[in-house]
Image (tube, grey):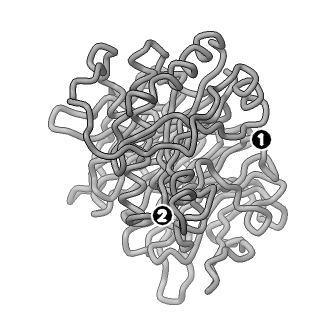
Amino acid sequence: MRSGTRVAWGLTVFLVLSGLGLSQVITDQARNLGPAVNSPKSDYAPFVSPDGKSLYFASDREGGRGGTDIWVSHRGADGQWGQPENLGPPLNTPGNEGPDTVSADGRTLYLTACGRENGLGMCDIYYSQLGDNGKWSKPKNLGPPVNSRYSEANASLSLDGKSLYFVSIRPQGLGGWDIYVSRLTYKGWSEPENLGRPVNTPGNEIIAFIHPNGQDLYFSTDGHGGYGGADIFYSQKTAAGWSEPLNLGPVINTPYNDMYFSVPGSGDLAYFSSNRSDTLGQEDLYLVPMPLVLNQLKIAALALPIKPAALAPTAAPPTTVAEKPIAEAPPITQEAITQAAVTQEAVVLKNVLFDFDKATLRPESKKELNHLLDLLRQNPDLSIEILGHTDATGSYDYNLNLSLERALAVYKYLLQKGIEPRRLSCAGLGKTQPVASNDAEEGRQQNRRVEFKVFRR
């Protein structure tokens, strides 16, 4: 939320369930929702209703009550989001309001409001209930001990309704905004507990979203490093406490501010907001396939404990038939990689071969990868994203996993040879981006490929 100036950095990222089919939007990057939902002003903090038919978000666009208001867009029979509507009073006022979370039954809405007469601090957490008449009640301040004379914001309610995660700038924290949790008891909400390290830092933890499974925590922070500004991280609750946070990588995080993250219990698509360069306004709502986010978590988990010595091949050479090109292509050139950094077009690793239906690099692939390795060493300001693809043979899920494993094989090879992990990322796109027809073997071979995109740091 924000009041005048940005509170909790003001940029919100939420992931929510979409009504569109995954195959319609699969991409290696986020897609702007466009002018049907976004405006020339700030549009952020989206979450979707339990039935997936209503998309709530915050905006300071024209037509509101003043400041930042809560808006809603309803999904039509064609799967497209309709013209947003202002929820009006009593939820919205001339002050600043924004949606936080909704209960599992969809009848209790938690919101952050700033500068209200009944507020305990600059910003407080409120709740409103949906009546039988379909109207939201006047928001009530959640009160102490959740709210304090300092600021609290951005609540996330567990699926069972018994745990409330939120951020606060109260001085008991590690510095800046920290993440807290309060438990529901027979006496009401308990005294909030600071999640502590390794989640919280002396920097700012902007939001915490607790997954419906009660174990997975997604949060925004500028205190763990990353791609720039605030990044989205993931941590899992274990018997020993919260696990070491993992950065979600370039699928979500950018040199811009990427914050506030939420995932529904089901759903293959996600929405978030960002102020990246292609916005229609200050902040826009974006769409991203959830498999890409989950792939990045898998990549981060695999890469975290890896040391170069552990990556040396130990398995016996494969005996299955290898995928071979029509003829060996020329190696990658300095000109090609320089041009790719400018155009952002993917460069195909044409001489990188795998066993059929496998993710094991063939020995003859090392020559091409060593060319790429030399170019990365000669250009230390460049980073690459490795993208794996398959043909259309097999199921969507199987191919998505196979393509990721192939991209990881290249990723690990370069990591083993000394390229810094921060210069590498990867994703598997399965059979969703063919470059040729899958009706013939020649086309299928072209579709079974690994390619990379170049970024200048």
Instruction: Inspect the image, locate mark 1, and give the three-letter code of the amino acid beneath it.
Output: Ser
Question: Residue 392 has which mark?
Answer: 2
Q: Residues within 10 Å of mark 2 (few under 14, many from 20)?
A: some
**Farthest-out residue, front:** 327
Q: Name the residue: 53% across, 34% down.
A: 351
Q: Name the residue: 44% across, 70% down.
A: 108
Q: Position of residue 193 (x, y in %)?
A: 30, 37
Q: Is residue 222 left or right of residue 33?
A: left
**Farthest-out residue, bottom:** 133
Q: Name the residue: 38% across, 27% down.
A: 363
Residue annotated with mark 1: 277
Pointer 1 and pointer 2: residues touching (CB < 8 Å)? no
The residue lying toward the viewer, choosing from 47 and 5, is 47
Q: Position of residue 274 (x, y in %)?
A: 67, 45
Mark 1: secondary structure: loop
Instruction: Inspect the image, locate mark 2, and give the three-letter code of the amino acid beneath it.
Output: Ala
